[in-house]
Amino acid sequence: MTTATATDPATDPATDPATDPATLRADYLERLAASDEAGAVAVAIDAVDAGVDPEVVLLDVVAGAQREVGERWAAGEWTVVQEHVATHISERVVGAVARRAPAPAPTGIGRVAVACLDGEWHGLPARLLAEVLARHGWAVEFLGASVPAAHLATHVHRAGPDVVAISSSLPSRLPVARRMVEACRATGTPVLAGGPAFGADGRWARAVGADGWAPDARAAAEMLAADPDGPWFADGPAGAGADDRSAREEQTVLHARRAELVGVAAGAARPRTTDTGDVPDVPDVPDELADDLGHLVDFLAAAVFVDDPALFEGFVAWVGSVAIPNGLRAEEVGPALAALAAALADSPRTARLLRDARGRLPVVPA
Amino acid sequence: MDGRPGVPTRDATTDTGPQTPPRLTPEAPPAPPAPPSRGPGLLDGLEEGVVVCDRDGVVRAANPAARRLLPGLRLGEVVDVARCESLTRAVHEGRHGPESVEVVIDHPEGERHLRARRGPVLGPIPPPPLETGDGDTCWYLRDVTGEQQRTDTLLAAQERAAFLAEAGRALHGVLHLDRTARRVVALAVPRLAAGATLVVRHDDTVTWATAELGGGRPRLGHTGTVDLARVPRLAAALAGEGVGAGCPWLGEELRTLTGRDAAGAGRALRACPVPTTGIVEGLVVLAGARADQAADELGTVEEDLLSSYVARAGAALAAAALHEEQAHLGAVLQESLAAPRLPETPGVEWGAAYRPARETLRVGGDFYEVVATGTGQRSAFLLGDVCGKGIEAAVLSGRVRQSWHALRLLEDQPGRLLSLLNTALLDAVATRDEDPRFATMVLGDALPRDDGTVLLRLATGGHPPPLVLRADGTVEPVPVAGMLVGGLREARFGEAEVVLARGDTCLLYSDGVVEARGPGDFFGEERLAETLPRCAGAPAPVICEHLEQTVVSWLDGHDHDDVALLAIRAPRRDT
């Protein structure tokens, strides 16, 4: 997802490998793959020294490479620890770039608090946003990854920022996003949402009540420069889904029964052969399978919450396509969905979503 | 249009000029025009007025109620003489006109609201026999003055209640003084005034906020209380000394204080002191809704609304100021107790994670410290857990950490240092009326050596044994144990030495990690030992971050104890 500025002809960097963002990104990614922190820092700092705009280094080189890292993880090529190591290195690089080319003093345009949703561990995109906004004159408070909703509320009360920017990569966090948005809006602070959690076009940002959505850090900076107060959605926040009482109730049911549902789905997906034929009290489910099914339930809850089947179907399509040892296998998805639909017959929306998703499954050779 | 409820059409009198006395004086009420001589008719007892007119508008019949409502009405004359223009027009339009009209008339007994509907024309009614003529209309008049007033009052009350509810709701959730101040002025415009300025004093800060019709976002500024000397009358008003409408100095002093024209400058200003709460002093200055409005006219109609609004503003400002004070206190305390930054030390890599049980508090009973002592020297570290949760535990942990910082300067041998800490903790508890407070901890130091290995010396009291993650992914617990710290003076503590080869990591953790209870079971030592090998080769901060995530996702939203992790690693490469 490179942007036009990556190859801005005005500076004509494309001819010089030392300043061409695409070349730099490839070099940088290579250093990440080798877990070479010093090398990665050198790529970024050398680029800044060679005259590349630090914002380009942060967004087109570091963030661009991190997106590739995320794709490699999603495709099952990298382990979660490898991804963590790469992200850790990129965090250090962001710090190094910020020290090498510090952001100018705030211009008084306003104060913004940047936070990741509770349970959102991908803190780097928010960290990058914080850096970019600081470079655009904002006084920025970066609250970090996985900020508990109560912590954010406390901060908003205490520091009184003009805007709260929340970041999330996982749509399964949308119910949490709703709580955080409500906490902010109760204080009259507008909320700008960002990150893939809110859908490719930000549609779910509206559903959780945010005042606006930005696809990336650059867009966020532009939106905030054009209108520091929001709301940025033309026709106001709060879409249909999240104000819908039954949607919220069904989501709450899913959340409360999560552990039980994981057990039910696991039993159906991978029937166990026991000597006695009894079902043991504590199901012996591999952690990887339990993780995948837990995510399945979370995405289901989020899809019910924002009333959008596409959210769930996107996850179902993905989870069957990734080969994690012991994880949910493609041929196990169908039985898991059927078992969940049976267990959730009392929740009509949820059950319909499950049936529809099951109907759309590709035929898997047994 | 005439028939609209509440719009006074004043049909009956005023067009004759102010000098003319009311045409029908109450001296002869009710003027009975040609009362039927043959006794009361069928309609005479009705409360509803009934008027029958022919097609030319001549009144053919009217019952006493109608004559009471329209004293000008005359039998045999055109309805126009009743001077009720809307009714006259409706009558003349006959059956093609409106079926009902509402009018306000000047009645000798005061302004009345009438509702008239065109109804069925009456048949012959004896006595007197009234022959129905073709084109007759019959009008039924009802006095709805009381009803109208009640409706108006109700609507106004509803509007005021809605405004106050909105004000309450908007002010209620804000616990930040500046934001509250902005909201107070934003709410006043345009409902109460064309411009509003708020001045609030809290401690030694004066905050002002101002909003103006069409002026965009409210503006806000701060100044010190010393500046109040330049605006003595405003200062007096803030302190609750008399101020009212039309004080000519208001605009001037506000300009002096805020450096800008008061909102709605040029209009009449009215000052409303915010009811004193003992926490903040405040003054709201409102500018007239209309440029020509006189000062004493401001808000006179809605005095009660104004005072309710100012009272809400005062309560919200006080709550915000109080919260800010408390929050500041808490923040300072938290800052002093929060997990410290890790040092950068050549030859030893550090990582940590911290998640207190009460996450809003950001501090808890778990703690860690790392102190670098110089290149090639031993770096001292400490990780522990005092019993309890929340701020009490955090304060006690602060005491333990301070003691450690001081004692490690005198004693660097871990076992002896732990004994000293034990004594210090017991002595400190003895000086207060406190129950004994126990702690568990691992402390020690790390010495980077020339071959890239790191030598650890450890001492432990009552704490889970540290784990060593070798570069190849094997996990070994360090076999060391000891008694609780702060329990007994003669407690015995275990000691151990560990050599970390390049890429090896030693992990110290608090029991919040293994006792994290998810929906099913505790996280447990086994699961921890199974998770660790996946982190082999990762930098120390990544190991801690990964473990924290694993534990939090295991918890699945359930409550947990404090969680603290400290990883000490011998880097794979020279740093």
Image: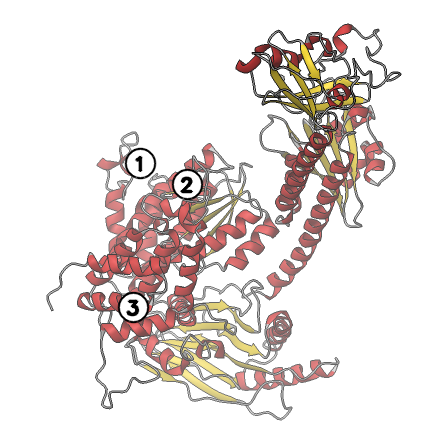
| Horizontal arrangement in the rendering, residue B410 relative to residue B293 (left or right) | left
Q: Is residue A114 above or below residue B286?
A: below
Residue B417 vs residue A166: left or right?
right
Q: Which residue position holds label 1?
A: A5
Q: Position of residue A83 (x, y in %)?
A: 30, 61
Q: Is residue B399 in sight in this rendering?
A: yes
In front here: B358 or B413? B358
Which residue is under mark 3? Answer: A342
Q: Secondary structure at mark 1?
A: helix
**Disc with the residue nearer the chain's start (3 vs 1):** 1
Tag 3 subunit: A
Q: Chain of mark 1?
A: A
| Amino acid type of the residue that numbered disc 3 sits on in the rendered structure | Ala
Image vertical order of residue B513 relative to residue A65, above or below: below
- Decide: few, some or many residues near mark 1? Use Cα within 10 Å; few <14, some 14-19, many ≥20: few
Real-space CA distance between mark 3 and mark 2, rounded to the nearest whole angstrom = 43 Å
Report the amino acid beneath label 1: Thr
- Tell me the kind of residue under disc 2: Ala
Q: Identify the residue at the far right of this view.
A: B27
Determine the secondary structure under disc 3.
helix
Give the label on residue A220, or none.
2
Question: Which of these two is toward me, A40 or B193?
Answer: B193
Q: Residue at x 79, y 24 (%)?
A: B297
Q: Seen in the image, is B16 located left or right of residue A220?
A: right
Of mark 2 and mark 1, the one earlier in the sequence is 1
Q: Residue at x 58, y 23 (%)?
A: B120
Q: In the rendered view, does A205 fall on the left or right side of B372? A: left
Residue B243 percent across, percent down from the top left: 85, 33
